[in-house]
Image: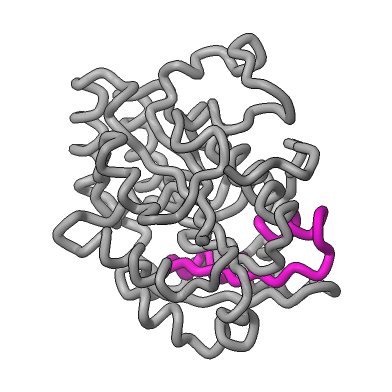
Amino acid sequence: MYEDTAAVDQDTGTDWEWARADDWQPPSELDTGTPHTARMYDYYLGGKDNFEADRRAAQAAIAAYPALPLLARTNRQFLGRAVEFVAGQGVRQFIDIGTGIPAVGSTSEVARRVAPDADVVYVDNDPIVATHARARVAGQQIGRTSVVEADLRDPAAILRDPALGATIDLSQPVGLMLVAVLHFIRDEEGAQHVVRTLRDALAPGSALILSHGSPDFATRESAAAGVRIYRGASSPLVLRPRGDVEPFFGDFEFAGPGLVQLPLWRPTAGHVRTADLPEGWQEVSAYAGVAFKR
């Protein structure tokens, strides 16, 4: 097992509202009538970068599964803790796929608290996310940061993108982040192949940071309703039990505590105490883990 070497700081707040003007309008070719998973997630976090269709779908999902906003917040906190932990292990490069619209911190901000010269590539298929990320990149002074507008379903295209190649040295350790994104890739779309392709491109010492929605801690009715609602969104929802999530890590070596329910992944710098967890944490139906390539 890899050990923790960095203190945990969960204050990763940032405000991305500055990234667009007050009179900003979505591009005319942007489909705002179909709920988009990234913008629904933004709504769960209390963000404002979403449209009416996103809000209606998100509200229906919350009605079916009231723990969704807590799950989203817990997931963002996991991202911060995991990036800080991996950077503390000496990793200085990160590829964040399925970036979403940050509301409580970004990968580059967290990584650079540990390593100011850390390099980061953000990857997302949503033009709004890419717009925000590019605006953020333009103001950074230390470390290289790039944005790739691409789809996780085509990992080879991500790996050969010139922006990634100019920022990330794949011969050196990389933190590959698949945080709350794989549950939008169906098995028939090659979910395991997608992750295997990305894992195989990484150098020894690299880390896979992953979280994934699951039916294991939700009622059958809530899980089924969530799946139905997301059928009308930009990507369907695939909730996987633990036994179907663990294979995404391949032969990578888990850091403690392994693959666990999302709120239980290193919630504090010391031992896990359920008394320190937020009310309702038992209903957060997702898994999280960090594992390293030998």
In the depicted view, which residue is nearer to us: 31 or 267?
Answer: 267
Residue 169 covered by magenta stretch: no
Looking at the image, residue 158 lies above or below residue 79: below
x, y percentage for residue 281?
50, 19
**Residue at (40, 21) in percent of width and height:** 66
Residue 125 covered by magenta stretch: yes
Looking at the image, residue 200 lies above or below residue 13: below
Residue 286: quarter of image? top left
x, y percentage for residue 103?
63, 46
Residue 36 at least partly seen: no
Q: State which quarter of the image contains the N terminus.
A: top right
**Residue at (57, 64) in percent of width and height:** 206
x, y percentage for residue 64?
29, 24
Looking at the image, residue 135 lies above or below residue 240: below
- Magenta stretch, residue numbers: 107-132
x, y percentage for residue 191?
26, 59
Looking at the image, residue 181 lies above or below residue 47: below
